[in-house]
Image (tube, helix red, strand yellow):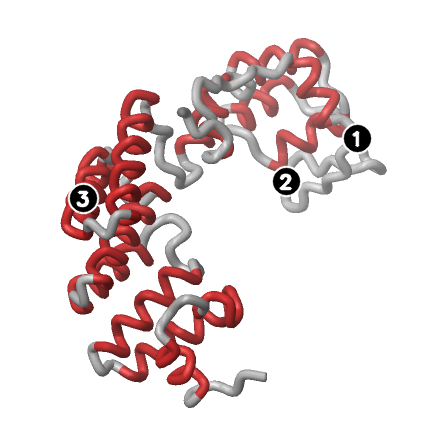
Amino acid sequence: MCRAGHRGKHGCGSTAVKKPVGEVARVRVGLSIEVRGSALRLNRRNRKMASDEEVRRLAAKGWSPEIDALFENGLPDAQMRILEAAGLFDDDNEGAADADDGLPPPLENEIDLAIQDTLGRAEQHMGAAQWDEAVAAFQSALRLLPAANALDEYATRGWTGIADALFFQQKYADAREALEQALKCDGGTGNAFVHLRLGQCCLNLQQTDAAADQLTRAYMAAGPDIFQGEDEMYFAFLQTRITIR
């Protein structure tokens, strides 16, 4: 299954849609922009038309507030063609903006399905209390992730699953290390369960200050319900550190 929509602009199979020049112009027309310090000094009271040479000079620098101001004053077709020839309406410009949005590329569908299948098997092992098998499956899922996606939400699930299995084996130090990796991944920080397990590991390792910090984060994110089904000592410890009403 392709996670279309999760990555915003990077929906699977999406392509940049080139706006017609006339449509772009209609969007720009009517903007109230005063370009202070510009040689053009375009505003509603001073509707001086820019020369073709000025338009070429501005277009060579890329899109700018000065270009926006040109549209307020109205552009002849000849000057619109100058902007178009400079590539200001090209799909490449939109693609460059998308490439700089800080998001990893979408996973290929085949890889996505393989990761989902592997995570599903890992969770089946968890349900059967097969901790070693679960750890191995979660690790396999992480290895399937390309380097560019090593911190996405699948990685969060992988590291959290590893930590959970290790926690039930009372391997608290190893579980803590896995949870610290989960915190670096998409959605890890602020995840109530991640903070809960990390706080529990720290308490079992006698790291009481860190335990109080992480358990407080879990409580603030999900309330007392996050402690249901857990050993009572964790919530009791938290009550010695913060006031709970």
Q: Nearer the viewer, residue 213 or 138?
A: 138
Frontmost of labels 2 and 3 is 3
The answer to whether residue 160 is left or right of residue 27 is: left
Against 64, is 25 above or below?
above
Residue 89 coordinates in the image, percent (x, y): 56, 18
Which mark, by number, is residue 30?
A: 1
Q: Nearer the viewer, residue 64 or 171?
A: 171
Identify the residue under disc 2. Answer: 38
Label 2 close to label 3 by CB (< 8 Å): no
Q: Residue furthest front?
A: 128
Q: What secondary structure is marked by label 1?
A: loop
Frontmost of labels 2 and 1 is 1
- Which quadrant of the view contains residue 42? top right
Residue 212 coordinates in the image, percent (x, y): 37, 80
Please name the amino acid that badge 1 sits on: Gly
In space, the residues marked 2 and 1 are separated at their CA atoms by 19 Å
Label 2 close to label 1 by CB (< 8 Å): no
What residue appears at the point 20 percent right and 59 percent down from the top-left corner? 166
Chain-order first, disc 1 or disc 3: 1
Residue 32 coordinates in the image, percent (x, y): 77, 38
Which mark, by number, is residue 139?
A: 3
